[in-house]
Image (cartoon, rainbow, N blue to C red):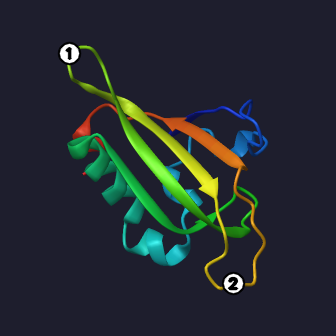
Amino acid sequence: MVVAWHDNLPGAAMFDHRVIGTHVSQFYPAADVALQRADRQLKIASILGADTREGWYRRANGSVFWGVTVIEALQLKNGELHGYSHVTRHSRDPRGCGHMTAGRVSRQLFMCTGVAAVA
């Protein structure tokens, strides 16, 4: 579940209050939601510490873009999973017809109570 959105980074997407309290899968296209791609990325990050993926993503307004996402597991000092940092950077459209939007970053922090919550 998304619990915070930090839009104070250079080029960050503007905060949209509608995303707070929703599952991070809202930023994935329907085909990826059906494959539970977001949950699998969270699981991989919880095991390996981070996961990176390039692909199509959705903005809060429903439009889609090509980007690279890095999900990093955030752990407490005792090693317990506390949540995740989710950073998406726009990149060149792989179809070759898009424009370069690298540098525009959206960042969301969302948390869960443990690995079982993302399994």
Question: Which is more N-terminal, label 2 or label 1?
Answer: 1
Q: Quadrant of residue 58 in the image?
A: bottom right
> Is the residue under label 2 in contact with that under label 1 (CB below 8 Å)?
no
Q: Residue 47, how many percent across, how many down?
A: 21, 44
* Circle 1 SS class: loop
Q: Tell me the SS state at disc 2.
A: loop
Residue at x 37% of width, y 73% of height:
35
Residue positioned 79% across, 42% down in the render: 14
Q: Residue at x 31, y 46 (%)?
A: 45
Residue placed under numbered mark 1 in the picture: 78
Q: Mark yes or no: residue 1 visible.
A: no
* Amino acid beneath label 1: Asn
Residue 99 location in percent, x, y?
78, 72
**What residue is disc 2 on?**
96
Q: How far from the left and from the top, in percent, is residue 10?
A: 76, 36
The answer for how far apart the CA atoms under marks 1 and 2 are is 46 Å
Amino acid carrying label 2: it is Gly
Give the residue displayed 37% in from the left and 66% down from the top. Answer: 36
Q: Is residue 67 left or right of residue 44?
A: right
